[in-house]
Image (spheres, coloured by chain):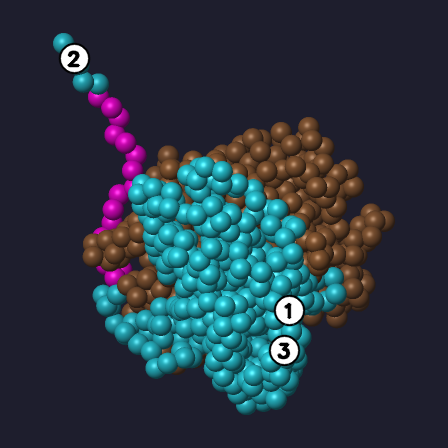
Chain colours: A cyan, B brown
């Protein structure tokens, strides 16, 4: 026979009906018009969800930061200095409000105080979008690879293509990783607004994810293809002459001194179309089918989509207005042109050192020169979108 | 994840580690710490292929719960006393979160161990999540809670309000100055490992007790990421400890970070939990009890103490002093009283304490009523406009305090206040530890050692300075803490939304002008200043004038 023990009454908070829901009473600020963030001007008529969760999270002494930044670096700089790029947006040369005893808050009267705040990421990235997007990508990539594995699709690859993938597709992972961490993540501390820095963080996620996708694909191939050397990509990256020019450029981009604008410009505007798309689209994705490989293009294609459809979009949206800036258009164009003169020759030289790779597969892809012409043409179109002229260096 | 095991996958991605050959990356952020390339492994063992779907699933749960809260009319059961304090908390917290994201690349450069960079990159992504999901939670409150004022102008308020400025230490401290001091010791070793327990675990529990289950939904989801960040900090700390030269800096930074976190987090979260709740069950934990469990036992005894054997000099004295401040010196009660004294300078409504609250406080903190009871009775008496001033300008045996130059919380435990002339200016500090932070720790030399990368405390650190000599109505108007009729104040010292019971700018016009304690301090002669300090140290508790206590 069992007995039921009396347990003392549990102590729990009691629900209370408070009627604290919207519309329960009328008072100043109770109306629907009071139910929106009201401290910034939306880019369009109606403010977006993206704007609500990003705009003004990073303060600006020219807006409402009346007590100013409260921590400084040893050199006296503080917060997010607008001088961490040489690019300028209208209003930045206006002095910060001088505050002191009895000055009051000196808040911005006509928001925004300068042109950097006009930038909005056209991808409207915040946490919800970035997880949905990237989760979808990794699911799709995983399924593609898994399906190919089950179908024994890798058995159809020619030995030459196996070598090509293990060395060259493998080597590309290092580029994505370095750019992801040491350009985009590194710059997410430097941008002038929360919208810039969040866009850079999201761009970084794409790169790091893609690098890992390639590494894990490489691991699968090591497990699935007899004789596939999973460490060959390291040897190629460290020693193959075809990769040293690219490596040099990538490392040089990370070494750009104290200018997030130049780093992002050199990467997304110059490097990506002239080298990234040249390799990913115009070599790997064009060659694979001829070797019975329908998987590698889908892995590569996810990274290509990141760049072509998202990362380039935000970059153009960030930089194009600067060439039309009501105050600093000429200054910015001169800078952009200087960066083009600096980085286009470096990237073209690196691209040409990659040329022998076009001869390695059995089924030849489109000729290197044709591929490079396509890349150059794509690059020129991007410059047009930015309001810049094609530099003479492109003809080298 | 595919069939590859997580461990195998994680091992594979270590092949991505980069050793520069042609160009070294630009080192933008300096540190005075030195690191050998110690073989510390990435403690997170996380790959993005599994991370993104995992986070998406967590998001789905959070947004599902949000949807459910709205459909279920959660706001019919939310305590206004509680949700009003969220106007402050949720205006602050998205900036610290996004600052944590911004701080991660400082560590990429300062910690020469590429294996750790994977974990730091994932933390960066997590922090973008936290900032925007919290900004979104606030948006939801604004849309569905009875009083949107204070939520709707949230970031303008936060940037210009003195409480916001106190909170900004918990953001700028992560991203400015010596990279290791900021992004590792202050952020991950102390703020995340110790104080997120009260922020993201204890406080959500209190929210639930007040009818708000959205805050726990969001913040427990956030806290599930924090455990990863704690691992990041631990790995960096062990690397730092392996170099003898770092120990002096570690000792300095732990002292600063511990004390500053105590001053800032205990002030804010202590107030929310003790004075923002309607749950007065005697067996629910007080903030002091939570602190003892979460911070003293779980952090200090279980996490910090074992590190002593590796050579870490632990600030035992400051840990004990923090407890002394909370338990014996009424730190949280003094702060809550000050918040309520200055209700008119803020952007949320502060409910008065009732007999039921008094009983609970007396039970949890014996002797509470004798110290604070009378003042809260005065607060209730003066809550609705009736020909008198707001409490700050009435005679209720309360001396308006000076601010601490370092932590910017006022010097509320009056006996501990110290003054010092630093950088040519007389400054008040709430405690010797805060004086030390400004005058000795945040300097280019420390105990004779060059520390060229150490940051500086800058800015207009005393809020009252900006409004010295201003009429209160103009101050509130200038800050924008006014409702859409152009005169009713956002803040109120009660919860009654009857417009006839609400304070307006007109009520403030007759008040005495704002006076900056620091401006006045710097106008004193040496003798006047000495007398002022002696008097101040004899004040309290509960802000009583010196004469009233002697």
Q: Which residue is mark 1?
A: A349
Q: Which residue is mark 2?
A: A2
Residue drawn at (53%, 56%) of the image: A360
Distance between mark 1 and mark 2 Cα atoms: 86 Å
Mark 2 neighbour class, 10 Å CA radius: few under 14, some 14 to 19, many 20 or more: few
B21 vs B131, nearest the viewer: B21
Q: Are marks 1 and 2 on the same chain?
A: yes
Decide which of tag 2 and tag 3 comes sooner along the chain: 2
Q: Which residue is mark 3?
A: A396
Q: Secondary structure at mark 2?
A: loop
**x%, y% of residue B236?**
63, 42
B373 vs B431, nearest the viewer: B431
Q: Magenta segment range?
A: A6-21
Instruction: Say if residue B401 shows up in the picture.
Output: no
Instruction: Say if residue A383 shows up in the picture.
Output: yes
Residue at the front extreme of this rendering: A362
CB of mark 1 within 8 Å of CB of mark 3? no
Mark 1 neighbour class, 10 Å CA radius: few under 14, some 14 to 19, many 20 or more: some
Residue drawn at (65%, 50%) of the image: A238
Q: Is residue B360 left or right of residue A374?
A: left
Is residue A83 found inside the magenta-colored segment of the image? no
Distance between mark 2 and mark 3 Cα atoms: 92 Å
CB of mark 2 within 8 Å of CB of mark 3? no
Say which mark, if any, is on residue A121. Answer: none
Examine the image and state in which quarter residue B505 appears.
bottom left
Mark 3 neighbour class, 10 Å CA radius: few under 14, some 14 to 19, many 20 or more: few
Q: Secondary structure at mark 1?
A: helix
């Amino acid at each position: 026979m069992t007995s039921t023990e009396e347990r003392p009454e549990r102590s729990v908070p009691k629900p209370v009906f408070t009627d604290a829901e919207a519309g329960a009473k009328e008072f100043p600020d109770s109306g629907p018009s009071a139910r929106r963030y009201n401290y910034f001007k939306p880019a369009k008529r109606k403010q977006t969800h993206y704007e609500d969760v990003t705009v003004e999270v990073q303060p600006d002494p020219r807006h409402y930061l009346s007590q100013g930044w409260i921590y400084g670096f040893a050199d006296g700089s503080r917060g997010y200095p607008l001088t961490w790029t040489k690019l300028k947006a209208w209003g930045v040369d206006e002095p910060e409000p001088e505050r002191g005893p009895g000055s009051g808050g000196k808040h911005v009267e006509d928001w925004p105080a300068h042109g950097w705040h006009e930038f909005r990421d056209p991808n409207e990235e915040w946490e919800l979008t970035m997880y949905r997007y990237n989760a979808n990508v990794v699911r799709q990539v995983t399924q593609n690879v898994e399906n190919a594995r089950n179908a024994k699709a890798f058995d159809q690859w020619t030995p030459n293509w196996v070598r090509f993938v293990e060395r060259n597709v493998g080597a590309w992972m290092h580029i994505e990783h370095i750019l992801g961490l040491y350009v985009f993540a590194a710059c997410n501390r430097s941008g002038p607004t929360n919208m810039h820095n969040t866009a850079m963080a999201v761009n970084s996620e794409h790169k790091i994810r893609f690098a890992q996708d390639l590494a894990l694909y490489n691991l699968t191939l090591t497990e699935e293809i007899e004789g596939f050397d999973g460490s060959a990509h390291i040897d190629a990256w460290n020693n193959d002459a075809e990769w040293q020019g690219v490596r040099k450029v990538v490392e040089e981009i990370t070494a750009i001194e104290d200018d997030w604008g130049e780093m992002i410009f050199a990467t997304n505007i110059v490097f990506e179309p002239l080298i990234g798309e040249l390799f990913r689209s115009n070599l790997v994705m064009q060659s694979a089918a001829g070797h019975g490989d329908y998987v590698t293009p889908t892995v590569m294609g996810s990274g290509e989509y990141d760049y072509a459809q998202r990362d380039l979009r935000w970059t153009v949206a960030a930089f194009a207005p600067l060439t039309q800036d009501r105050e600093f258009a000429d200054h910015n164009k001169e800078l952009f042109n200087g960066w083009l003169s600096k980085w286009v020759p470096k990237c073209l030289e690196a691209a040409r050192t990659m040329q022998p790779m076009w001869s390695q597969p059995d089924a030849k892809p489109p000729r290197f020169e044709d591929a490079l012409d396509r890349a150059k043409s794509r690059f020129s179109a991007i410059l047009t979108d930015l309001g810049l002229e094609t530099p003479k260096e492109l003809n080298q | 994840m595919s069939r590859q095991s997580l461990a195998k996958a994680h091992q594979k991605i270590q092949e991505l580690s980069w050793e520069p050959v042609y160009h070294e990356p630009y080192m933008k952020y300096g540190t005075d710490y030195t690191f050998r390339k110690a073989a510390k492994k990435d403690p997170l063992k996380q790959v993005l292929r599994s991370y993104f779907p995992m986070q998406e699933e967590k998001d789905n749960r959070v947004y599902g719960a949000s949807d459910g809260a709205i459909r279920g009319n959660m706001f019919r059961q939310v305590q206004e006393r509680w949700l009003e304090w969220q106007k402050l908390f949720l205006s602050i917290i998205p900036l610290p979160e996004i600052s944590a994201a911004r701080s991660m690349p400082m560590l990429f450069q300062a910690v020469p161990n590429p294996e750790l960079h994977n974990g730091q990159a994932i933390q960066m992504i997590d922090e973008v999540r936290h900032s925007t999901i919290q900004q979104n939670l606030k948006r939801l409150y604004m849309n569905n809670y009875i009083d949107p004022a204070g939520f709707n102008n949230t970031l303008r308020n936060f940037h210009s309000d003195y409480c916001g400025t106190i909170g900004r230490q918990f953001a700028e401290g992560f991203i400015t100055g010596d990279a290791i001091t900021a992004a590792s010791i202050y952020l991950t070793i102390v703020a995340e490992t110790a104080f997120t327990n009260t922020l993201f675990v204890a406080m959500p529990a209190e929210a639930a007790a007040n009818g708000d289950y959205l805050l726990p939904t969001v913040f427990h989801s956030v806290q599930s990421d924090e455990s990863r960040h704690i691992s990041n900090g631990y790995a960096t700390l062990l690397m730092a400890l392996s170099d003898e030269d770092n120990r002096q800096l570690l000792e300095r930074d732990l002292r600063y970070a511990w004390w500053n976190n105590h001053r800032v987090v205990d002030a804010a979260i202590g107030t929310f939990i003790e004075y923002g709740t309607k749950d007065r069950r005697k067996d629910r934990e007080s903030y002091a009890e939570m602190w003892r469990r979460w911070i003293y036992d779980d952090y200090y005894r279980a996490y910090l103490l074992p590190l002593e054997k590796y050579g870490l000099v632990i600030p035992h004295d400051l840990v004990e002093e923090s407890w002394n401040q909370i338990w014996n010196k009424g730190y949280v009660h003094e702060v809550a009283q000050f918040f309520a004294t200055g209700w008119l300078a803020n952007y949320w409504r502060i409910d008065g304490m009732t007999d039921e609250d008094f009983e609970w406080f007396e039970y949890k903190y014996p002797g509470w009523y004798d110290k604070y009871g009378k003042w809260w009775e005065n607060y209730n008496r003066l809550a609705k406009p009736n020909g008198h001033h707001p409490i700050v300008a009435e005679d209720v045996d309360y001396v308006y305090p000076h601010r601490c130059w370092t932590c910017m919380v006022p010097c509320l435990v009056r006996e501990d206040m110290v003054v010092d002339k630093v950088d040519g200016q007389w400054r008040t500090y709430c405690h010797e530890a805060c004086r030390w932070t400004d005058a000795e720790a945040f300097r280019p030399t420390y105990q004779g050692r060059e520390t060229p990368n150490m940051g500086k405390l800058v800015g207009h650190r005393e809020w009252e300075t900006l409004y010295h000599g201003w009429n209160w109505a103009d101050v509130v108007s200038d800050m924008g803490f006014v409702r859409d009729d152009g005169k009713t104040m956002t803040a109120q010292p009660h919860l009654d939304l009857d417009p006839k019971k609400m304070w307006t700018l007109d009520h403030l016009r007759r008040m005495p002008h704002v006076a900056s304690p620091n401006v006045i301090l710097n106008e004193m002669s040496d003798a006047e200043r000495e007398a002022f300090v002696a008097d101040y140290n004899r004040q309290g508790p509960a802000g009583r004038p010196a004469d009233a206590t002697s």
